[in-house]
Image (cartoon, rainbow, N blue to C red):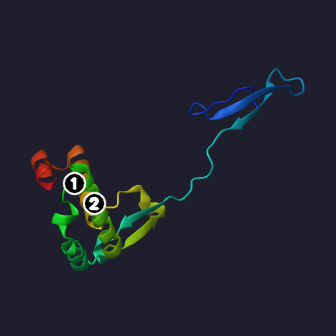
Amino acid sequence: MLDLILTNKEGLVGDVKLKGSLGCSDHEMVEFRILRAARRVCSKLTTLDFRRADFGLFRDLLGRIPWDKALEERGAQDSWLVFKGHLLQAQERCIPTERKSGKNTWRPPWMNKELLGKVKQKKEAYRGWKQGQVAWKEYRETV
Protein backbone atom coordinates (compact mmCIF):
# COMPACT_ATOMS: atom_id res chain seq x y z
CA MET A 1 0.00 0.00 0.00
CA LEU A 2 1.30 3.46 -0.80
CA ASP A 3 1.37 6.30 1.67
CA LEU A 4 -1.36 8.04 -0.31
CA ILE A 5 -5.14 7.90 0.08
CA LEU A 6 -7.42 9.16 -2.71
CA THR A 7 -11.16 9.66 -2.27
CA ASN A 8 -13.90 11.24 -4.32
CA LYS A 9 -15.55 12.90 -1.31
CA GLU A 10 -14.17 15.02 1.46
CA GLY A 11 -14.58 13.60 4.95
CA LEU A 12 -14.77 9.99 3.79
CA VAL A 13 -11.53 8.95 5.51
CA GLY A 14 -10.54 9.53 9.14
CA ASP A 15 -8.11 8.38 11.83
CA VAL A 16 -5.15 8.35 9.43
CA LYS A 17 -1.96 7.03 11.04
CA LEU A 18 1.46 6.36 9.53
CA LYS A 19 2.79 3.02 10.77
CA GLY A 20 6.39 3.11 9.55
CA SER A 21 7.97 1.62 6.48
CA LEU A 22 7.58 -1.94 5.37
CA GLY A 23 10.91 -3.63 4.75
CA CYS A 24 13.39 -1.42 2.91
CA SER A 25 10.75 0.60 0.99
CA ASP A 26 10.71 4.40 1.14
CA HIS A 27 6.91 4.34 1.48
CA GLU A 28 5.16 4.19 4.82
CA MET A 29 2.23 1.99 5.76
CA VAL A 30 -0.96 3.95 6.30
CA GLU A 31 -3.73 2.91 8.64
CA PHE A 32 -7.08 4.66 8.21
CA ARG A 33 -10.76 4.30 8.86
CA ILE A 34 -13.45 4.72 6.20
CA LEU A 35 -16.19 6.86 7.67
CA ARG A 36 -19.63 5.92 6.45
CA ALA A 37 -23.12 6.10 7.76
CA ALA A 38 -24.88 3.00 8.96
CA ARG A 39 -26.74 1.03 6.34
CA ARG A 40 -29.72 2.78 4.92
CA VAL A 41 -32.88 1.95 6.69
CA CYS A 42 -35.64 1.18 4.26
CA SER A 43 -37.87 4.19 4.74
CA LYS A 44 -41.57 3.55 5.02
CA LEU A 45 -43.91 6.24 3.86
CA THR A 46 -47.57 6.28 4.85
CA THR A 47 -49.92 7.86 2.33
CA LEU A 48 -53.66 8.23 2.03
CA ASP A 49 -55.27 5.77 -0.39
CA PHE A 50 -57.96 7.91 -2.00
CA ARG A 51 -58.94 5.10 -4.40
CA ARG A 52 -60.43 3.16 -1.48
CA ALA A 53 -61.89 6.19 0.32
CA ASP A 54 -65.56 6.36 1.32
CA PHE A 55 -66.34 9.92 0.27
CA GLY A 56 -70.06 9.49 0.95
CA LEU A 57 -69.40 8.79 4.64
CA PHE A 58 -66.79 11.56 4.70
CA ARG A 59 -69.32 14.08 3.36
CA ASP A 60 -71.96 12.79 5.78
CA LEU A 61 -69.68 13.06 8.84
CA LEU A 62 -68.71 16.64 8.01
CA GLY A 63 -72.33 17.49 7.15
CA ARG A 64 -73.58 16.39 10.60
CA ILE A 65 -71.43 18.94 12.43
CA PRO A 66 -73.32 22.12 13.42
CA TRP A 67 -70.66 24.49 12.09
CA ASP A 68 -72.47 27.62 13.30
CA LYS A 69 -72.27 26.43 16.91
CA ALA A 70 -68.85 24.79 16.56
CA LEU A 71 -67.22 27.98 15.26
CA GLU A 72 -69.33 30.51 17.17
CA GLU A 73 -67.39 33.27 18.96
CA ARG A 74 -64.00 31.89 17.97
CA GLY A 75 -61.13 33.69 16.32
CA ALA A 76 -59.63 32.67 13.02
CA GLN A 77 -56.95 30.47 14.60
CA ASP A 78 -59.35 28.69 16.97
CA SER A 79 -61.88 28.19 14.15
CA TRP A 80 -59.16 26.68 11.98
CA LEU A 81 -58.10 24.29 14.76
CA VAL A 82 -61.70 23.14 15.32
CA PHE A 83 -62.27 22.65 11.58
CA LYS A 84 -58.94 20.85 11.18
CA GLY A 85 -59.72 18.52 14.10
CA HIS A 86 -63.09 17.51 12.64
CA LEU A 87 -61.57 17.10 9.17
CA LEU A 88 -58.77 14.85 10.44
CA GLN A 89 -61.21 12.72 12.46
CA ALA A 90 -63.37 12.20 9.37
CA GLN A 91 -60.25 11.47 7.32
CA GLU A 92 -59.11 8.76 9.75
CA ARG A 93 -62.50 7.04 9.56
CA CYS A 94 -63.08 7.30 5.80
CA ILE A 95 -59.74 7.31 4.00
CA PRO A 96 -57.51 4.27 4.51
CA THR A 97 -53.74 4.59 4.48
CA GLU A 98 -51.17 2.53 2.65
CA ARG A 99 -47.52 2.03 3.42
CA LYS A 100 -44.99 2.47 0.68
CA SER A 101 -41.52 1.09 1.05
CA GLY A 102 -38.58 0.09 -1.07
CA LYS A 103 -38.10 1.42 -4.56
CA ASN A 104 -41.36 3.40 -4.67
CA THR A 105 -40.37 5.82 -1.90
CA TRP A 106 -38.14 7.90 -4.17
CA ARG A 107 -41.09 9.35 -6.01
CA PRO A 108 -43.88 11.50 -4.61
CA PRO A 109 -47.13 9.78 -3.63
CA TRP A 110 -49.07 11.55 -6.41
CA MET A 111 -46.76 10.22 -9.15
CA ASN A 112 -48.77 7.35 -10.64
CA LYS A 113 -48.13 5.13 -13.68
CA GLU A 114 -49.98 7.47 -16.02
CA LEU A 115 -47.82 10.45 -15.04
CA LEU A 116 -44.66 8.34 -15.23
CA GLY A 117 -45.63 7.39 -18.79
CA LYS A 118 -46.15 11.03 -19.74
CA VAL A 119 -42.80 12.04 -18.22
CA LYS A 120 -41.16 9.25 -20.22
CA GLN A 121 -42.84 10.51 -23.44
CA LYS A 122 -41.64 14.03 -22.72
CA LYS A 123 -38.06 12.86 -22.17
CA GLU A 124 -38.12 10.79 -25.36
CA ALA A 125 -39.47 13.76 -27.34
CA TYR A 126 -36.75 16.00 -25.92
CA ARG A 127 -34.08 13.45 -26.74
CA GLY A 128 -35.43 13.23 -30.32
CA TRP A 129 -35.36 17.02 -30.70
CA LYS A 130 -31.88 17.24 -29.19
CA GLN A 131 -30.55 14.64 -31.65
CA GLY A 132 -32.16 16.49 -34.56
CA GLN A 133 -34.69 13.76 -35.35
CA VAL A 134 -37.72 15.90 -34.48
CA ALA A 135 -38.49 19.50 -35.45
CA TRP A 136 -38.93 22.10 -32.68
CA LYS A 137 -42.59 22.66 -33.54
CA GLU A 138 -43.33 18.94 -33.42
CA TYR A 139 -41.48 18.65 -30.10
CA ARG A 140 -43.47 21.55 -28.58
CA GLU A 141 -46.76 19.96 -29.71
CA THR A 142 -45.77 16.72 -27.99
CA VAL A 143 -44.80 18.46 -24.80
Q: Position of residue 134 (x, y in %)?
A: 17, 50
User: As drawn, is 115 to the left or to the right of 5?
Assistant: left
Q: Is residue 137 above or below residue 94?
A: above
- View extreme (right): residue: 23
Q: Which is nearer the eye, 117 or 69?
A: 69
Q: Is residue 1 above or below residue 85?
A: above
Q: Can residue 112 be seen from the camera position used here?
A: no
Q: Is residue 16 above or below residue 41?
A: above
Q: Which is nearer the eye, 69 or 6?
A: 69
Q: Residue at x 16, y 53 (%)?
A: 143
User: As drawn, is 64 to the left or to the right of 108?
Assistant: left
Q: Which residue is mark 2?
A: 82
User: As drawn, is 23 to the left or to the right of 85?
Assistant: right
Q: Residue at x 28, y 66 (%)?
A: 86
Q: Quadrant of the N terminus?
A: top right
Secondary element type, mark 2 = helix
Secondary element type, mark 1 = loop
Point out the frontmost of discs 1 and 2.
1
Disc 1 to disc 2: CB gap under 8 Å:
yes
Q: Amino acid at mark 1?
A: Arg
Q: Quadrant of residue 12?
A: top right
Q: Quadrant of residue 57?
A: bottom left
Disc 1 crowd, CA 10 A, few/some/many (<14, 14-19, 20+): few
Q: Which dot marks residue 74?
A: 1
Q: Position of residue 20 (x, y in %)?
A: 85, 24
Q: Amino acid at mark 2?
A: Val
Q: Earlier in the sequence, mark 1 or mark 2?
A: 1
Q: Position of residue 36 (x, y in %)?
A: 63, 42
Q: Which is nearer the eye, 87 or 5?
A: 87
Q: Quadrant of residue 95?
A: bottom left
Disc 2 crowd, CA 10 A, few/some/many (<14, 14-19, 20+): some
Distance from label 1 to label 2 (Cα)?
9 Å
